[in-house]
Each structure stands twice: as structure tokens, then as C-alpha cells.
Image: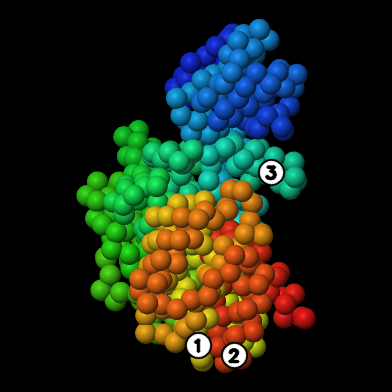
Amino acid sequence: MNQITTSYLAKKVKGNLIGDINPIKGVFTFLNRAKPGDVVIRHWIDEKGIAIASEKGVSCIITQNPTKDAVKTSKKLKLPLIITPKIEFANAFALKWAVNTFAQDSLRVVVTGTNGKSTTAHMIYKILDLAGYSTYTNTDAKSEFNTLIDPVVAVQIAEFEDINNEAIQAMVIEVSEVQGWLDKLMKDHACMMTSAIDPDVLVITNVGLDHIGLVNSIDETFTEIYGSLKAVSNRSKQDKKLEKNNSKKRYAILNSDDPLLLKMGDLIQKKDSINLLSHGTLDNGPLYQNITLKSDGIYHCSKLFMKKEELPFSSKHFLQNTMAAIDACLVLNIDEKLIKQGIASYKQLERRFTVLGRDPLIIDDFAHNPDGIVATIKSAAKMSEGNLCVVFAIRGSRGTAINGLNTEALINGLEGLNHNIIITSSSEVVDNANTVKHAERDIVLKTLKENNLKYVYYENLYPTLKYALENTKKTDTMLLIGAQGMDPANKLILNLIKI
């Protein structure tokens, strides 16, 4: 961190420096991984944490909540402490610093939106990797690193070259569309993190309801997601003002089947500060739609790009993600043959419409919010020759609002279908952070009863799956949906099949 001091850092994170103005010589990291010279970022810290940091020889600590005798101890040990009003200021700065320090000349893609972020980001990552780029991504099967509410991505970027023996040439970073801490919305999270990454390409998958409690309406979700588009647009404006002849061309890729993303496109077009592209199924889509899904395949500017039979999956949401990935890679000038090869050979992330069995057909999906649930049910129904048996995991410790909406989505998705419903709290397999509360269970069961839908409820996941297998015919389709509560199902059900 050349020429960065504790004083400079305090200004950048809008914080108050307690202690001396010292040079900073390390990276941004966690307390348990800190080395001499590093900067530790923590939401809260007490006097014990201060003492541990001092022993490790860190340059300073940034926190939002110093508790107990943290301030007193930092003064005593002469360890600079920066208190910021919002910890996201620190994490955004750490991310920006890591990108500029370790990947300044890299190709950069940000993917955000309510559904499909992980699949889209993972597909782009696979194509870039196939094209020979040394590529970093924070996407994984469980979406553990996409929150950006701590310095984990900054740490991974800093460590990438040491681990992979290559510098980062490209990065695909998934940005959570809405984020919070202690049940409070981290306002402008997507805007802040997108701005810190400064991408060449921004992909927005859709706008839907999730994270109820942090945001309570689709309008609030729209505002948070739109922030990422404004961040890229504002950077383009800055480039034009500076008359940078060699400045990046910045692109935003939108799903034109989503009316709210079309609204975003209209808003941003008026500012004329970014290159807009879109994909969708509409023949009369917006003028900037250049990728279109038709009955025989995916078209790019009226030319058939990939035939339907060349695509590895046919579900609607997968095809939306595929079109977004194609568009992103095309604007990054990746060879078309490599894009096609990457799509055709793509192996999806776990729990993304994953087929676990064929006799009966068993599909496992991470669907955990209303839009995702409806889309997944409709895709599974098209593949079913008989009844659709839905095994539905309640979202634990997420509140009654989202569980009520998820249940309504379940009901809407199943309308007109022959189906069975099995509900579970997955109590024996979830941790404290995902435990289903009585009120959450009650709202799910009450909503089903009020809509005259029959169901079977099991407290634990294992007997739920056992019952589902015993009551599903070979011609039926079993659909496992839910977030953390359904994560262990794939291993459990495969063991049951063997018995």
C-alpha cells in the first residue's frame, strides 16, 4: 500500500481515526488471517480483538462498532483504530484497492440481480477460462462469497497470484442485489460494490422480491439494483468529461423479458452514457436487444448463434442466463467458437436444476424466492409425465414475510398441475442461522390451508425425503426446492435410492 496512511484511509472510509498517522504496509483482511502490516476490517471488535490484532502487528483496524473497552485498549496499545459510520465503506475501499493493486488491467464483469446471478457468473467464468484467461470469480455453489459485506473477495484477489502462479487477467464478480447487517439494509450496496470493481460489463439478470425485511417492496429492490447501473453509467460520464481517448467501453446487459429492466434501460438511455445491450424472447424487443431466443435456438443480431439441440439445458431461466453469458463474452471479444464450446460443454453449479435421478425424475434447485420458485416449478412440470411431487423447504430465520410470499408462489406455480406437496423444516440438518421458527412454519402451513391445498409436513428432512420417494411413481417428477434447508438433500436422497 504505497503512500497510504491511516489518516488517508480514515478519510476514504469516512471514519474517525483514533491513534497515530502511520503508513500501511499490508493488505485488507480478517483478524484471524492478519499478518504484520495488514488492515483488519470487522463489523465490531472488543478489547480482546484489539489485543489480538496488536500481537499480530497489524497496521490498523477499521470497525463500525467498537464495543466494551476497545477504544481504551487501542489507545493503550498504540494501535490505530478507525471507526467508520458504515462498514461497507471499508469493504468497498478494500475491494477497489485489491482490484487496482492486483488486477488493474484485467477484464471485469459484474453480475447482479435477484435470480440467476451464480449460474450466469459461473458460465462467463468457464468461457473466459476456456479462452485462456487466468480468471477469478467469487461465485460458488452455495453463493458464500457474493455478499461483499466483509473483505473475503479482497483477500482472495490479493492471494490469487500466489495460489495460482498467475496474475489475474479477468474477473467475474457476483454482487448481491440487496444486502444487510443485523436486519438493517446496507443502502446502495450494489452501487458501491459495482463502483469499486469498475467493470467493463455489467449484467443484470432480473428484478424480483427477496430479502424481505431489508426491502419491503419491489420498488425498493428496483432502486437497489438500479444503483449498479448508475455506478457504471457515472463512470462512463467521468471518462467522457476527462476526454479519455483510451477509456474503456462500458456495457450493461439487461434481460428484456423483465419489464423492470426495460424501465432501467429507458432511464439510463436518457443519460446516454453507457452502451446498452439486451437479450430475450421478444421479436419486437428494445432496439438494443441483440440476443434473441427463438424456437430453433439462440440468435445474435438475426443470425443463428446456437441451435436448440446444442444447448445443454432447456429450462427458461437457464436459457436467460445463457443469453446473458453469450452477450457478455461477445462484448469482451471472446472468439465465437470458444463461446459456443463453453456453452455446449457447460456443467452447472450444484442445486441449479440438477437432475439427481431418472427413475423417477428427481430435480434439485436452489429456488428460494417467489420468482425463482414459479420459474422452477414451470420448468419441472414440462419434464413430468405424471404428477409433480414438490418437496419444499421452509426458509429458516428469514421471517414470515418471505415465507408467506414463497408459499403463495408455490401455490401459483402449481395451479392447474397434478401435484403433491411435502413441506419440511429440515430441523436436523440446519444450523442456528437457518432454523425454522414456529411463526415461519405456521405462515407456510396456514397459507396452504387457506388456499385448500393438501400437504404433508415433516419436521426433519430425512423422513421427508423417504416419504417422498415412497409416494412418487416412476412416471412422476420430484422437485426439491428451497435454500439452506434443502442443501443436504442431494446426498440424503442418493443414499435412500441405494437402500
- The vertical placement of 241 against 173, above or below, is above
Q: Amino acid at mark 2?
A: Lys
Q: Amino acid at mark 3?
A: Phe
Q: Identify the secondary structure beneath mark 1.
A: loop
Q: Residue at x 64, y 51 (%)?
A: 431
Mark before the other along the chain sequence, 3 or 2? 3
Q: Is residue 310 visible?
A: no
Residue 498 at x, y percent in the picture: 76, 80
Q: Is residue 229 left or right of residue 486?
A: left
Q: Identify the secondary structure beneath mark 2.
A: loop
Q: Residue at x 71, y 32 (%)?
A: 32
Look at mark 1 in the image and give the residue it sits on: 387
Look at mark 2 in the image and give the residue it sits on: 473
Location of the N terminus (image quadrant): top right
| Mark 2 and mark 1 residues within 8 Å of each other at the beta carbon | yes
Residue 357 at x, y percent in the picture: 65, 81
Rounded to the nearest angstrom, the CA distance separating label 3 from label 1 is 48 Å
Look at mark 3 in the image and give the residue it sits on: 160
- The vertical placement of 218 against 471, above or below, is above
Q: Is residue 313 left or right of residue 268?
A: right
